[in-house]
Amino acid sequence: MSNPRVNNGRRAKKPKKELSSPLWMTTYSDMVTLLLTFFILLFTMSVIDIERFQTVIISIRTSFMGYTGIMEQTPDPFESPDDSRSFEDGFFSEAAMLERAREAEAIMAMVEAFLAEIGLEGQVEVRLDERGVVMELPDYIFFERARADLRLEAREVLDKFSELFVNLGRGIIVEGHTCNLPINVPEFPSNWELSVIRAVRVTRYLVEERGLDPHLFTATGYGEFQPLEPNLSPESRARNRRVTIVISVFTPQRSIEAY
């Protein structure tokens, strides 16, 4: 009887075993990789961007004073390098931020006194936000319903507003807002056009009729898409139909003259 291990006089070779690492090596290598990633993460977190850190701290402090949001981050082209409110490496210094906050409060007090003087106290909502002093004026002060022609009384109000703006010399943002009631006339196919034209008419009167610097004005319209409250009643819709005038605290003070 032949030996099964002998094949034609030769001994059969044993199959070679595949070389492989012990099973514990897989777990060990995973652990080492995770540790490396962990220490890289720790190193990354330890490198603090001082400028951004200071900006966040200033923003938090400003928020506790009644404002919200990160303030303007771009350099002010009108300010000289040696101005006390100048930027430090592209960011407002803390002293400059606090100074602008005090300016905003002073401007708001001036606006409230002005509105009381011209008889609009209680009709105009005044507040502060990250842009500056915001006035919400009901549309009936300026326009007839669904119209964009300035009323005669509106011109008188804007004449008085122009005196305030001349004294302040700040950037002015004029925003048009409507309620959600649809409008579809040849002049205004939608509330977009109505809101934009209203803002432009107010701005053009102040610039063209009162001689204010056009470079300090921005006119924009939001239609019904930035309501003060939900359009659920005639009263809420009336409140949402408004012209918003923002006196910017973050644009430079410049000398402007009226006719």
Image (cartoon, rainbow, N blue to C red):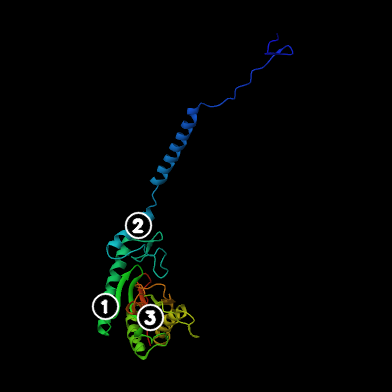
Q: Residue furthest right?
A: 8
Residue 66, position in %: x, y?
28, 65
Residue 110, position in %: x, y?
27, 77
Residue 223, position in %: x, y?
43, 76
Q: Which residue is mark 3?
A: 256
Which amino acid, by three-letter code, is at mark 1?
A: Glu
Instruction: Name the mark on residue 61.
Output: none
Which is nearer the eye, 3 or 158? 3
Q: Is residue 51 above or below residue 20?
A: below
Say what secondary structure mark 2 lies in. Answer: helix
Q: Residues within 10 Å of mark 1 (few under 14, many from 20)?
A: some
Q: Which part of the image, by quadrant, shows the C terminus? A: bottom left
Tell me which residue sits at (27%, 71%) in the image.
Answer: 105
Are the two marked residues, 2 and 1, in contact with CB atoms closer than 8 angstroms?
no
Q: Which part of the image, by quadrant, shows the N terminus? A: top right
Q: Which residue is mark 2?
A: 56
Q: If you read the primary sequence from the N terminus, does the residue marked by circle 2 or circle 1 appear first? A: 2
Instruction: Name the mark on residue 112.
Output: 1
Q: If you read the primary sequence from the N terminus, does the residue marked by circle 3 or circle 2 appear first? A: 2
Q: Is residue 237 above or below residue 63?
A: below
Which amino acid, by three-letter code, is at mark 2?
A: Val
Which is nearer the eye, 258 or 160? 160
Are the two marked residues, 1 and 3, in contact with CB atoms closer than 8 angstroms?
no
